[in-house]
Amino acid sequence: MNNHALGLFALTVLPLICAPGPDMLFIISQAVSGSAVAGLRATLGVCAGYVVHSLLVAFGLAAVIAASPLIFESLRWAGVLYLAYLALQLLRSAVKPRAAGVPKEQVAHQFGKGFLTAALNPKGMMIYFAILPQFMQHDQPAARQALVLSAIFIGLCALVYSVLSAVVATTGSKAGGLGDRRRRCVEGISGGVLIAAAAKLASH
């Protein structure tokens, strides 16, 4: 895998990380209710949950490639369609005004709750299966490639959510939370980037 492919992968998953979802809303709720430390504990738990997805997907994709390159190619095209679907969902949400609905209840054991939030989220697993095959090469070990890509995804999650925790805890829920205008802007940009990514990957 070359640096260009890794950079393109990072640009593809970054909009998904930044788009509001269960992980982000939980982390914000803990940073608002507690402190940046509470948000960071929740962030570590979410990242640990994605490690579980990483291991399952890494060895699952390796088994698929070993079984049939045709199945793997079908999975790749299904992933392109799923990316386009996610993009359209984000764009549709961006044009609809609605309250952000960020809960403000601090929970005990933020790490454990964050872990379960990510590990038990089937959408997280689908995102892995949709995106990783687009950047993997048939002539290289599948498990190693999947683990490298997963490490980039988890690292970006840790960076984005850690910064978010610090900002929310410092500025408070009104400035740092997900106001409706901010949410719509983030979802609109994320959806547009994902449409472009799906089109580029489909052309390969």
Image: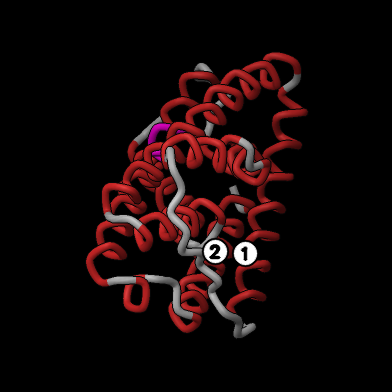
Q: Which mark is residue 97?
A: none
Residue 123, placed above or below residue 20: above
Residue with the most extreme left position:
170
| Image quarter in which the N terminus is found | top left
Q: What kind of colouring is applied to the model shown?
A: secondary structure
Q: Residues within 10 Å of mark 2 (few under 14, many from 20)?
A: some
Which quadrant of the figure has residue 110? top left
Q: Amino acid at mark 2?
A: Ala
* Residue occupying image coordinates x 43% and y 38%: 109
Q: Amino acid at mark 1?
A: Ala
Front-most of residues 146 and 124: 124
* Left or right relative to 35: residue 130: right
Residue 153 on the magenta segment: yes
Residue 131, placed above or below residue 98: above
Front-most of residues 30 and 81: 30
Residues in magenta? 149-154
Front-most of residues 103 and 46: 103
Q: Secondary structure at mark 1?
A: helix
The residue where tag 1 is placed is 87
* Residue occupying image coordinates x 37% and y 38%: 44
Percent of width and height locating residue 114: 48, 41
User: Alpha-carbon distance for marks 2 and 1?
Assistant: 9 Å
> Which marked residue is nearer to the observer: mark 2 or mark 1?
1
* Residue occupying image coordinates x 36% and y 46%: 156
Q: Earlier in the sequence, mark 2 or mark 1?
A: 1
**Main SS class of the magenta portion in the image:** helix
Q: Secondary structure at mark 2?
A: helix
The residue where tag 2 is placed is 196
